[in-house]
């Protein structure tokens, strides 16, 4: 039996056509699943009984188990248990423009970034498309409100789970599905070049975020092993081509780590690296974790770094902070659970 949430509308239509269904049955079923959020195929009353019987024997309607929720004023953190008892997390952030969630794409992660909690555990497996979709559905259910924005920035490297990621985007964007606008969807990657190139041909205006975290190859390789495979000197030209081809929004994420990558010189070097790229820089105050050797830059140095980028005409913002109180740094909830 397969999870029905693994299927894009096109795949569902293809399935239904095999059983003398019509194309519009696929659209209707999508509405039943994503608007009315049915829990059994029998509820889809305008779909022929015969087709419903096929659906029932081939598919289940998945739902993630929530094992823990930490709530704060404008942020909730969810720890989910998957069918094989693995755990992933997702975070809800309430913004003035809507509800945004950060979803996970893998159980564990193989990228090994030195500052990141998620990478403490190697990748166990990719999440299925359905498991990603269910994170959105389960949080909507908890809130009783619509999710308007999705960022794929939780546990895992989304471009290391490319096909499921693409189907996930198609489903949450679908006009008969969750209807999350493509400009409200952001995928974050550590910089897997072949997938960035492939993504540039994916015809959806989705935002791309690159975890940069250093302005030169020596420093970046020491923080992010992936840089040895896809160094900045190759990555930056690929990103320039990507924005020329797609005109999509590109953001560089840069965690400020005290005395590691937060000097004035780093800010100048970063400005030169990305000048004329029409990209945004999002400066991220580091969320301290228990196990690692890094600490957050001082408020003064964060502002100094920001000012230097501004002076150099770089579009820069400092990430609004959510939930460091409730261990919302990527991967922390799960690490805590597994330490217990
Ligand atoms: N693998 C993808 C997506 C997951 S990481 C990527 O690398 O982009 C999501 C973002 O959170 C990345 O920019 C990552 O570098 C950042 N991050 C990881 N640990 C953090 C911490 N302790 N504090 C703040 N940001 C962190």
Image: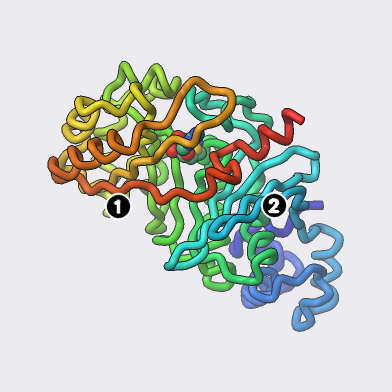
Location of residue 158 with respect to 193 vertically, above or below? below
Q: Identify the residue shown where x is 52% and y is 23%.
A: 112
What SS does tag 2 mark?
Answer: strand
- Locate residue 221: give its quadrant: top left
Q: Identify the residue shown where x is 80% and y is 79%.
A: 48
Q: Nearer the viewer, residue 19 or 101?
A: 101
Location of residue 80 with respect to 237 vertically, above or below? below
Look at the numbered disc 2 and say if its residue's Cβ is closer than 8 Å to ligand 1: no
Q: Position of residue 15 (x, y in %)?
A: 70, 62
Q: Identify the residue shown where x is 69% and y is 34%.
A: 336
- Locate residue 82: give its quadrant: top right
Look at the numbered disc 1 and say if its residue's Cβ is closer than 8 Å to ligand 1: no
Look at the image and tell me whether residue 197 can be seen. Answer: no
Which residue is label 1 attached to?
Answer: 246
Q: Residues within 10 Å of mark 1 (few under 14, many from 20)?
A: some
Q: Say which of marks 2 and 1 sits in front.
A: 2
- Locate residue 327: give its quadrant: top right
Q: Disc 2 versus disc 1: distance between alpha carbons?
A: 38 Å
Which residue is label 2 attached to?
Answer: 69
């Amino acid at each position: 039996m397969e999870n029905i949430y693994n299927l894009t509308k096109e795949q569902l239509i293809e399935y239904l056509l095999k059983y003398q269904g019509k194309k519009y049955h696929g659209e209707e079923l999508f509405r039943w699943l994503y608007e009315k959020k049915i829990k059994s195929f029998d509820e889809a009353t305008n779909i022929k009984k015969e087709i419903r019987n096929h659906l029932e024997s081939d598919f289940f309607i998945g739902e993630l188990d929530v094992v823990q929720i930490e709530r704060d004023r404008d942020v909730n953190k969810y720890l989910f248990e998957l069918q094989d008892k693995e755990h992933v997390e997702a975070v809800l952030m309430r913004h003035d423009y809507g509800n945004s969630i950060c979803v996970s794409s893998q159980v564990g992660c193989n990228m090994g970034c030195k500052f990141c909690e998620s990478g403490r555990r190697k990748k166990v497996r990719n999440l299925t498309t359905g498991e990603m979709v269910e994170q959105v559905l389960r949080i909507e259910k908890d809130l009783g409100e619509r999710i308007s924005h999705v960022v794929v920035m939780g546990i895992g490297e989304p471009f290391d789970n490319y096909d499921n990621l693409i189907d996930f985007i198609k489903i949450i964007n679908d006009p008969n599905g969750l209807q999350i606008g493509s400009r409200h969807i952001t995928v974050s990657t550590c910089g897997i070049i072949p997938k960035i190139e492939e993504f540039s041909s994916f015809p959806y205006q989705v935002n791309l975020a690159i975890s940069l975290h250093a302005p030169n190859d020596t420093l970046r390789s020491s923080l992010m092993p992936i840089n040895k495979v896809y160094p900045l000197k190759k990555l930056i030209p690929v990103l320039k081509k990507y924005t020329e081809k797609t005109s999509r929004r590109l953001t560089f994420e840069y965690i400020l780590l005290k005395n590691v990558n937060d000097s004035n010189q780093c800010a100048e070097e970063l400005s030169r690296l990305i000048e004329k790229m029409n990209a945004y820089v999002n400066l991220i105050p580091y969320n301290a974790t228990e196990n690692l050797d890094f600490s957050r830059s001082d408020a003064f140095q964060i502002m100094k770094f920001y000012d230097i980028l501004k002076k150099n005409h770089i579009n820069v913002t400092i990430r609004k902070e959510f939930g460091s109180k409730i261990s919302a740094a990527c991967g922390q909830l799960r690490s805590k659970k597994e330490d217990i």
